[in-house]
Image (tube, grey):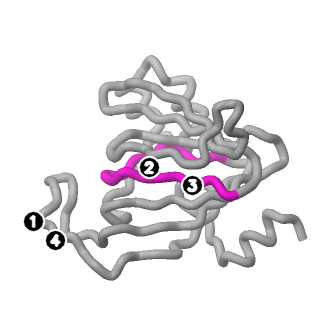
Amino acid sequence: MTRMAQLIKQFSLLPHPEGGYFRENYRSSGEIKSTSLDSNYKGSRNYSTAIYFLLTSDTFSAFHKINQDEIWHFYEGSPIRLFTISEKGVLSEHLIGSDFNNGQLPQLVVPGTHWFAAEILDPNSYAFVGCTVAPGFDFADFVLAERESLSVEFPQHSDLIHRLTRIDA
């Protein structure tokens, strides 16, 4: 059994809509009431949630966004290249991994409402990470990018958007 298959089995990971595999491993019992959240949220949210996430080199985490800040935590495997596009169209590239002397970060915060996508750097590999979201994640806050509409919104990044999206509509 490969290490990747072992992790999928050991942590009961399931396919994620954006690509890769995941399993929620934490959801706080406390909630933030909707009256204390901004208008991006419909309903209450848990204080925080966390998932295990495994990304493989034969796929990518497609451009998507959520309302919340998301913190990525690197555990093992290949470094990840993560791209963000701000609401103003500013593209940023980040390396998440364990080679700190070469600019890789063990944690990265993706600001809420930024579009983001990720890919593995090494061929025939994987990355095992965790993602923490606050306020807690709800699929009501999840938007998977449509290739053409995101390219129209940010034409200066259309090549990258076309490479790291799955939905043509």
| Amino acid type of the residue that numbered disc 2 sits on in the rendered structure | Leu
Q: Position of residue 21 (x, y in %)?
A: 63, 63
Q: Which residue carries the number 3 mark?
A: 73
Mark 4 falls on what kind of element?
Answer: loop
Residue at point 42% right, 32% down?
85
- Which residue does the numbered mark 4 point to in the structure image? 33
Q: CA distance from mark 1 to mark 3?
A: 30 Å
> Which is more toward the observer, 73 or 54?
73
Q: Which residue is mark 2?
A: 144
Residue type indicated by callout 4:
Lys
Figure check: 61 above or below 12: above
* Residue highlighted by disc 1: 35
Question: Tag 2's secondary structure?
Answer: strand
Residue under the point 31% across and 52% down: 67
For the point 31% across and 32% down, which residue is it?
87
Tag 3: amino acid? His
Locate residue 63 relative to residue 99 in the image: left or right: left
